[in-house]
């Protein structure tokens, strides 16, 4: 229950009540008469009683009772005036416009609701957006002396931040329609009501616009105050969600000098990023665009986007000179749906404003609509609270009422908390749309995307929380579409410099420094990167190499020219200043703009820098020596065929000999006679291998079989000869090692290039440090192989495929590349994270690698001599039955068919013997044979 302090005064005569009754009622009910505030200090003749409102018992004299009754009856018929403070800069045109909207709102409201029992009585105090102390003093005066129940204003976020604590102490709601900084929300004061949108509501629209054109980097330019800084964390988060980076921020004081603005803009000229988001008030923003125009930053290739901090106030800065400096600028602006009520209000306001402020040229904007709706909401809430509290108004006096300090004497509003709750419940359709507070502020709505062209701003599209970027709001396509971030959803745009082509958002500064490109230093494999050291000057110079020539070819393939300096990553003694991870870290730290060389794409490095597409073959290979096994196997002649082919061939030799004997022995003398005819038949069959058979073949069926068999034998002998030749010649090129597990099992030594990531792969495979050897050059690797494991050498070497191919080009007759091949992503160039140059270089790499230029570069650096290709593990598999069963099928079918025909003919010719029942079985057999 709220306590209220009531002062009593003895009235000597009823005749004096005309001047005293307002004082008594004002003290009792807290209602001002308009003739001055009740004194906070009771006189010596006054009685004081501090009780709860429901417990106050009034015991006045007869004359006093008469005065109270008369005034109470009058109060039941007349509206109650409720003091409301207004803190605005009435000296500015914008302030006059907002105050006019507030007054018209109350006039319209009470004209629509004449039966309401309350009337808002405005107490206007002047403020300064740049002087928060003056604003605070005005608010304190309104609370202490005028005892206002709420304050409309202040004008800026800086002033609001200062007043929130003051109004919370007094339980006086502060309703601001122009303080839009998101940082005010974090204060979490229930007495701060934002009757406008939060600046953070526009960051999704900004990020969608930036994403639509594929810009990867953005530089925000904002004021160094509460308004400017409040939105930056939200903008950073929104851009990060669409993978857009903020490489730099430009912060300008709200009263920055022209020299300061120029100096900051000159810094941006020397940077690559050409997309700028301007978040500041029009007074400072117009000066920024003026300086940018003079520095040539409003030409083709630049992108300027202004937030609603400027675009919502665009009508107040639309002078010819300012507009000339902003040609091609894009903006995000709060959208207010046009209605008959809104258009009618615009006409009425313009007429009224010109009557009250002749000579002041100000256009109505969204802040004026919010001011109108804020006054309407406050009048509605006050009516609800006063009715529910039976007219109980006033302030609970502070315990330090005797203090001379105004802050200590500040009282507490009786209806403050009730008024806040009523404002939260307020819901109506205002000029700006639906007025409904959630989290003590209006919710985000639709934004317009505007383009400054000539002397006006052209609407090129809209952004909605549901559909993203859209061309129009009322089409059926828009209503049914999904969230869009495509620039095709926007209308035509005129960019700075009168260009109709969307800028790429970055460029190499022509007036800036050259790109500093870091190059690794190698003591071996100089074909990739050749860096020489001059001992006289203690300097290292990049002379060339395969990677350097690839970069130069890529640079020529770019659609624009870049200037660069190649800097060796070397210490004063000429050795490399670190490993490849350290080199990548130098680019990450911003010490260098890029790095070019034999740099492998690795996952851990890609966390903090960007790689281009690879320009070499990927993978890690194993190199082993070749062993010579020529003539060391006595049974090598059996290897051309598998055992099943040998067995099948032998069986068919016997079968063919039998078939030919059956077909020939009755009519051919060479196949008749004593039992040695079996040997004759086998001799005939096997001699066909070398076509040395001397026996004549008389029968046509036998000739048919022999012809087919000779064809089969010819193929078998030729295949055998080819396979045996391959075995005798290729077998001497077999690798000494084909399995990594064999190396691990026998604890063989293996080698890798110094400083390479291959060391980590070998450790993962299980190799111990005592079995690992390093090399820097191809000559050192060859020497390690010659020594072997027994002499502190190696049995195998592991390195990236480009290095191994270069090694084999020199020592192709001694070594070969074998499986396994481990995954790696090849060589690439390094750029800072989210660098736009990395994307263009990657496209240029594709153009180079797909053309003939890449082959010329590889031939120049890697083709040493004509050398037999031994990069593959050539195997010589024996011929099996699976590859020859078709031949045996043909000869088998032909032979069987000949036998069947022969038997049929024979049985037909000797059918009389078969039908002779008197002949014995053995006689018939002898006749047949």
Image (cartoon, rainbow, N blue to C red):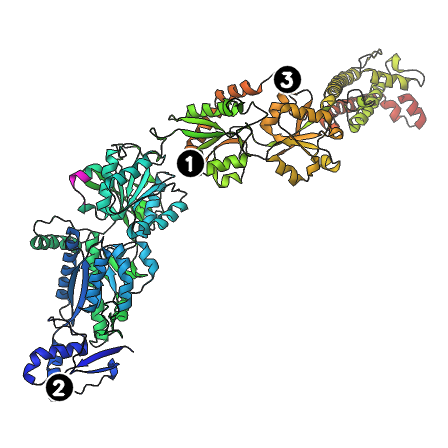
From this viewpoint, which residue is outermost toward the front?
536
Image position, residue 577 (x, y; %): 54, 32
Q: Residues within 10 Å of mark 2 (few under 14, many from 20)?
A: few
- Of the pair 698 and 6, the residue shown nearer to us: 6
Which quarter of the figure is the C terminus placed in?
top right
The answer to whether residue 918 shows anywhere in this view is no
Which quarter of the figure is the N terminus placed in?
bottom left
- Of the pair 193 and 575, the residue shown nearer to us: 575
> Which residue lies at the image location 32% right of the left edge and 52% below the top edge?
230
Mark positioned earlier in the residue sequence (1 or 3):
1
- Residue linked to disc 1: 835
Image: 18 above or below 103: below
- Residue linked to disc 2: 65
From this viewpoint, which residue is outermost toward the bottom?
62
- Residue linked to disc 3: 867
Q: Quadrant of residue 398?
A: bottom left
Residue 500 left/right relative to 814 = left
Image position, residue 435 (x, y; %): 25, 60
Mark positioned earlier in the residue sequence (1 or 2):
2
Helix, strand or loop at disc 1? loop
**The residue stretch that appears in magenta:** 317-322
Helix, strand or loop at disc 3? loop
Residue 81 left/right relative to 648 = left
For the residues labelled 3 and 2, the Cα–Cα distance comes to: 124 Å
């Amino acid at each position: 229950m709220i306590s209220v302090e009531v002062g009593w005064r003895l009235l000597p005569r009823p005749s004096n009540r005309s001047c005293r009754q307002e004082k008594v009622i004002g003290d009792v009910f807290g209602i001002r008469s308009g003739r001055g505030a009740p004194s906070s200090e009771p006189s010596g003749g006054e009685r004081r009683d501090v009780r709860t409102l429901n417990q106050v018992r009034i015991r006045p004299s007869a004359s006093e009772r008469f005065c109270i009754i008369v005034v109470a009856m009058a109060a039941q018929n007349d509206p109650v005036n409720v003091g409301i403070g207004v803190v605005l800069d009435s000296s500015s045109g914008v302030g006059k416009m907002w105050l006019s909207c507030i007054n018209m709102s109350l006039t319209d409201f009470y004209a629509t609701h004449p039966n309401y029992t309350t009337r808002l009585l405005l107490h206007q105090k002047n403020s300064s957006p740049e002087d928060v102390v003056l604003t605070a003093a005005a608010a304190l005066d309104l609370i202490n002396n005028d005892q206002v129940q709420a304050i409309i204003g202040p004008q800026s976020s800086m002033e609001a931040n200062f007043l929130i604590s003051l109004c919370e102490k007094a339980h006086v709601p502060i309703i601001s329609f122009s303080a839009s900084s998101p940082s005010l929300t974090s204060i979490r004061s229930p007495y701060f009501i934002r009757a406008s949108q939060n600046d953070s509501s526009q960051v999704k629209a900004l990020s969608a616009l930036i994403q639509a054109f594929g810009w990867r980097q953005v530089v925000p330019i904002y004021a160094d105050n509460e308004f400017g800084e409040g939105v930056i964390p939200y903008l950073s988060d929104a851009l990060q969600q669409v993978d857009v980076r903020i490489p730099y921020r430009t912060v300008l004081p709200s009263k920055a000098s022209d020299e300061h603005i120029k100096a900051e803009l000159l810094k941006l000229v020397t940077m690559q990023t050409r997309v700028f988001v301007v978040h500041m008030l029009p007074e400072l923003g117009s000066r920024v665009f003026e300086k940018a125009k003079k520095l040539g930053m409003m030409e083709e290739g630049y992108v300027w986007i202004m937030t609603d901090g400027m675009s919502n106030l665009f009508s107040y800065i639309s002078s010819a000179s300012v507009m000339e400096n902003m040609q091609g600028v894009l903006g995000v602006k709060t959208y207010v749906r046009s209605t008959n009520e809104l258009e009618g209000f615009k006409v009425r306001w313009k007429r009224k404003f010109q009557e009250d402020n002749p000579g002041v040229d100000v256009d109505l904007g969204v802040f004026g609509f919010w001011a109108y709706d804020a006054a309407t909401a406050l009048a509605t809430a006050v009516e609800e609270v006063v009715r529910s509290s039976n007219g109980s108004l006033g302030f609970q006096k502070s315990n330090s009422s005797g203090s001379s300090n105004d802050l200590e004497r500040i009282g507490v509003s009786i209806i403050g908390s009730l008024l806040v709750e009523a404002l939260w419940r307020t819901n109506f359709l205002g000029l700006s749309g639906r007025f409904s507070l959630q989290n003590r502020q209006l919710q985000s709505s639709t934004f317009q995307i505007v383009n400054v062209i000539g002397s006006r701003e052209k609407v090129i599209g809209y952004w909605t929380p549901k559909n993203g970027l859209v061309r129009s709001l009322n089409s059926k396509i828009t209503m049914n579409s999904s969230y869009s971030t495509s620039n095709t959803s926007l209308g035509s745009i005129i960019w700075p410099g009168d260009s109709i082509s969307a800028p790429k958002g970055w460029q190499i500064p022509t007036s800036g420094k050259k790109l500093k490109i870091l190059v690794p230093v190698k003591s071996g494999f100089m074909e990739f990167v050749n860096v020489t050291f001059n001992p006289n000057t203690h300097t290292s110079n990049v002379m060339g190499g395969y990677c350097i020539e690839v970069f130069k070819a890529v640079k020529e393939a770019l659609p624009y020219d870049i200037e660069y300096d190649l800097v060796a990553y070397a210490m004063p003694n000429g050795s490399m200043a670190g490993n490849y991870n350290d080199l990548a870290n130098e680019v990450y730290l911003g010490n260098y703009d890029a790095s070019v060389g034999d740099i492998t794409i690795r996952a851990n490095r890609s966390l903090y820098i960007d790689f281009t597409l690879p320009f070499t073959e990927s993978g890690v290979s194993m190199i082993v020596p070749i062993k010579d096994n020529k003539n060391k196997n006595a049974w090598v002649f059996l290897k051309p065929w598998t055992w099943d082919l040998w067995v099948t061939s032998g069986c068919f030799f016997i079968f063919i000999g039998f078939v030919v004997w059956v077909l020939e022995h009755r009519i051919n003398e060479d196949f008749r006679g004593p039992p040695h005819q079996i040997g004759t038949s086998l001799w005939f069959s096997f001699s066909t291998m070398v076509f040395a058979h001397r026996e004549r073949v008389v029968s046509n069926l036998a000739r048919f079989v022999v012809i087919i068999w000779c064809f089969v034998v010819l193929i078998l002998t030729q295949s055998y000869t080819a396979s045996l030749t391959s075995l005798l010649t290729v077998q001497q090129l077999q690798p000494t090692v084909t399995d990594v597990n064999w190396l691990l099992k026998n604890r063989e030594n293996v080698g890798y290039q110094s400083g390479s990531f291959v060391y980590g792969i070998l450790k993962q495979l299980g190799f111990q440090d005592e079995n690992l050897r390093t090399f820097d050059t191809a000559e050192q690797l060859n020497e390690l192989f010659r020594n072997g494991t027994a002499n502190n050498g190696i049995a195998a070497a592991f390195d990236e495929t480009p290095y191994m191919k270069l090694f084999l080009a020199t020592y192709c007759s001694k070594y070969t590349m074998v499986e396994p091949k481990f995954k790696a992503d090849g060589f690439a160039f390094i750029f800072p994270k989210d660098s736009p140059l990395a994307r263009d270089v990657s496209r240029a790499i594709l153009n180079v690698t797909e053309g003939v230029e890449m082959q010329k570069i590889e031939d120049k650096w890697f083709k040493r001599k004509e050398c037999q290709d031994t990069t593959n593990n050539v195997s010589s598999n024996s011929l099996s039955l699976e590859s020859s069963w078709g031949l045996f099928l043909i000869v088998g079918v032909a032979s069987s068919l000949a036998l069947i025909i022969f038997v049929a003919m024979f049985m037909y010719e000797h059918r009389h013997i078969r039908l002779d029942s008197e002949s014995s079985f053995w006689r018939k057999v002898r006749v047949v044979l």
